[in-house]
Image: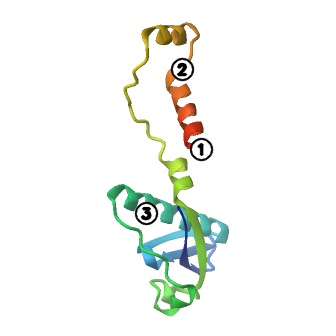
Amino acid sequence: MKQVYPVIFTPLNDEKDTVLIEVPDLDILTEGYGMADAVEMARDAIGLKGISYQDKGIDLPGPSALNGIDVSQGTFAEEGTGCVSFVDINFDEYRRKVDNKTVRRNVTLPNWLNLEAEKAHINVSKVLQEALMVKLGVSR
C-alpha cells in the first residue's frame, strides 16, 4: 500500500544542520541532519508507525491536504521557519525491508523427498522461501 503524508520540516541552521520533523497526521516528532537525512527519517518513522498500526489492526489515518497544514501551528513553529512537503511510503516494501524476524513453520514432506534433499545438502527452508516469493510475486 502506497501513501503520502504531509510533513513539516523545520531547519535549525545549527552546526549539525539539524532539521526538526513533524508528521501531524500520525503524531510523529523526530529529527534528521540535513534535508536528505530528514526526509529518510520521516519516511522511516511513518513506515514504523504504519506497520505497527497494521499489526494492531488499527486503520491508518488518511493524509491531510497539503494546503490544510498550518506551519505556524506546528510543534516546532517557535524553533525556526518550517516548510511542508509530502513524504511517500510504500508500506509493503517497508515491511519487507525491516520485518525480517523468522517464524517457525511445520512442513510435511514425503520421507523419500526429505532424504533426497538431505543427500543433496539442500536448505529446505530457503527453497520454500524462494518458492513462496515466486508464487506470491514478491521480492525482498
Q: Are marks 1 and 2 in contact (CB under 8 Å)?
A: no
**Residue 70 drawn at (x, y percent):** 51, 91
CB atoms of marks 3 and 2 within 8 Å:
no
Earlier sequence position, callout 3 versus callout 1: 3
Which secondary structure, mark 1? loop
- The residue tagged with tag 3: helix, strand or loop? helix
Q: Residues within 10 Å of mark 3 (few under 14, many from 20)?
A: some
The relative height of residue 69 versus residue 17 in the rendered view (above or below) is below
Q: Is residue 111 left or right of residue 16?
A: left
106 left or right, relative to 94: left
Per the rendering, the mark at residue 85 is none
Which residue is tagged 2? Answer: 123
- Identify the amino acid type marked 3: Lys
Residue tagged by mark 1? 137
Which residue is at a point 63% across and 73% down the rendered structure image?
Answer: 17
Cα–Cα gap, marks 1 and 2: 21 Å
Which residue corresponds to the image point at 46% horizontal and 59% vertical from the top-left? Answer: 48
Q: Nearer the viewer, residue 109 or 82?
A: 109
Q: Amino acid at mark 2?
A: Asn
Q: CA distance from mark 3 to mark 1?
A: 25 Å
Residue at label 3?
49
Point out residue 130 in the picture as x, y percentages from the top left corner: 57, 32
Determine the image quadrant of residue 111: top left
Q: CA distance from mark 3 to mark 2?
A: 34 Å
Q: Closer to the N terminus: mark 1 or mark 2?
A: 2
Q: Quadrant of the C terminus?
A: top right
Q: Residue at x 47, y 86 (%)?
A: 74
Nearer mark to the viewer, of 1 and 2: 1
Instruction: Decide which of 12, 117 is in the foreground and name it.
Output: 117
| Label 1: how many Cα within 10 Å (few below 14, some 14–19, many 20+) | few
Secondary-structure class at tag 2: loop
Q: Is residue 139 left or right of residue 75?
A: right
